Each structure stands twice: as structure tokens, then as C-alpha cells.
Amino acid sequence: MTNVPRHHHFIPQCYLRGFLSANQKKEQLTVIDLKQRKSFETNIRNIGSKRNFNTAKIEGKESVEIEKALSQVESILSEGLRQIEISRNLSDEMTNAKIFNLIALIVARNPSSRSNHIDFQKQIFQQFSNIMVSEKDIFESLQKRAKLNESVSYEQMKEFIQSDRYKIDVPNECCIPLEFEAFDVILPHIFNRGWILIISSDQTGPFVTSNKPVVLVWKYPERIPPFYRRHPGFGMQDTRVHFPISKNLALLGEFGFTDTVLIADKNTVSLINSTTINYASPQVYAPDVNFYFKNVNGQIRLGSDIFNEQAK
């Protein structure tokens, strides 16, 4: 098979285009890598993606069938992004639905979420393996029920499990169906929120985004035990969703909100950008470094100072 797409975007390119500078000939964004503490410019093809992220073996289908289907979905989402950029309001339910689906898709299908799932599956397998070889009777019973190779003795299996001579591999086929299930769970909690559409300007500077652009936080984090503060759920009350739609628009969603539009000042844009930066893992994407954020002292700073100033 030739011309098989291998570079799969978990952050759609149609979304990333919303952060390009006006009248820009090349589709390049400024990437700020918080881990490596460096910034550079690159084409949007090279960011928000992972090789073979959507590749899966499906009987009777091509391995890139999911990638092709998602490309069709993204063309619909792209229309929603275009429409809200023009209207700059939340009055059209169909446009809102496209944006909400984009939010849920980004949350459910992200490498960090998949990595957490893979680690969980590995832990389960390791625990099961340890139980299997904990007693000879348990091993022989499972060996018989699962129709395992009877030529492998209990002693051989125990020695193998307790060694480091094997690797646990969790294929995409195990992860992708669960991600779409997560999408179905998350989406109603996006629709059920009220939203503030926040509009930036030349005076406030642009919104920025990241490789993890949907941020869910507690509204009153001081009331939450420290261990749970970074782990709210989308269905929980007193939580807030931050999502930069483009360099010009951002969404803030809470249960009980009434949909409204807010013209942002520099302080508001700085706060939203700081939230995006603090939850990036680890890349921030911007038209250039001329955006505003807040440092730990609450002072507004330019993006060009980001490695000298810790975001608030």
C-alpha cells in the first residue's frame, strides 16, 4: 500500500490554523517547549500529532480506516470553527454542537490519556500474572481453564513472570474503542454547561493554545483535598472548562452559566493564557511570542519572557 498516512493529528490542523497570524503565507506557529525551555517555529503539520496514533487492525478494513474517518469528521468541525469566528456569538446551536464535539474529541483522544490507560492495563496484567504464579494450584487451575500450553510448568512460568525478560504491549486496538466510549461520556457534560465566549483584540494580544488545550479545573480548588485538585471530572459541579478556540476567541464553561459574550481586557486574556500554559504538556502554540500571561506574582508579562517568568 502506498501513500499511507502515518502522521496522525490528535490536535486537528483545522483547529491549529486558528492561531496563525493574519495573512500568513506559511502555516507556521511558534512552539514554546516548556520542558526543553526553548521556542521555535514550525509548520502545523509537525505539531499536535503522533506517528500511527490512529492506526488499528480492523477485519476487512485498511489499518488507516479510523484516520480517514476522523479526517471527514474534522472537515465538519472545521466548518464550526469558521462559523463561530465569523459570528462571534453562541446563538447558533449547530455551530455550538460542532465546537462541543471538538472539545470532547480532544479530551478523549490525547496521548497523555492513552498513556494513562496503557499504564493501567499494564498494572492489571502484572497483578494478574503475580496472582497466577502465587500458588501452584492457582496456576494449574488457570492453565486448564484458559487452555494454556501444558508443557510449561509452574516453576518455569513463575521464574519467567518474576524476570525482566518480557515486555507488555497494549496495542491501539485496545485503546481506541475506549477513547470513543470516553467521548460519549464526556460530550453530554460539555453540552450541559453554560458558556462565556471571550473575544480578544489587538490591545489584549492573542490567546494561545497547547498540545492539551482543554483544561478542566475546580472553581474553588482550596476546598478540594490537594491530591484531587488536578483530577476533577467533567460531570462534577463547581468545575470550569477553559478552551481557546482561536487566537481571537476562547470559551469558559460552567454548570449554571448563562451563555454570553465577553469582550476581554488584557487581564482576562493573560489569566486564560496562564491557565493554558500551566496545563500544557509540554508545548504551547502561539502566532508569535507577543502574547500576555501572568507570572506567579500576578504581574502581566510578554510571552518572550516566559522562560524568565513562571506562569501564575
Image: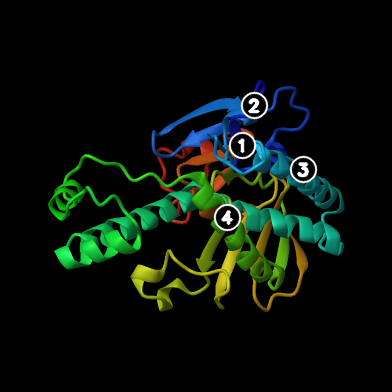
Relative placement, left or right, of 218 versus 94 is left
Tag 1–tag 2 contact (CB < 8 Å): yes
Answer left or right for 158 relative to 119: left
Mark earlier in primary sequence (2, 3)? 2
Local packing at callout 2 (Cα closer than 10 Å; few below 14, some 14-19, many 20+) is few
- Quadrant of residue 92 within the rendered picture: bottom right
Mark identifier at residue 177: 4
Image-based side of 168 in relation to 86, left or right: left
Residue in the picture at 51% in, 65% down: 217
Query: Which corner quadrant of the image does residue 167 belong to?
Result: top left
Report the residue marked by disc 1: 63
Nearest to the eye among marks 3 and 4: give it: 4
**Lower sequence index among marks 1 and 2:** 2
Question: Would you call the spot at circle 1 few (<14 residues within 10 Å), some (14-19), or many (20 or more)?
Answer: some
The residue wearing badge 2 is 4
Could you say whether the residue bearing mark 4 is in a helix, strand or loop? helix
For the point 20% across and 50% down, the residue is 161
Please state which amino acid type lies under the numbered disc 2: Val
Q: Camera-side residue: 140 or 161? A: 140
At label 4, the amino acid type is Pro
**Do the residues under discs 3 and 1 have CB atoms within 8 angstroms?**
no
Q: Earlier in the sequence, mark 4 or mark 2?
A: 2
> In whole angstroms, how far apart are the C-alphas of marks 4 and 2?
22 Å
Residue 235 placement: quadrant: bottom right
Q: Which mark is residue 72?
A: 3
Q: Secondary structure at mark 3?
A: helix
Image marks 4 and 1: residues in contact by CB distance under 8 Å: no
Q: Is residue 74 above or below residue 177?
A: above
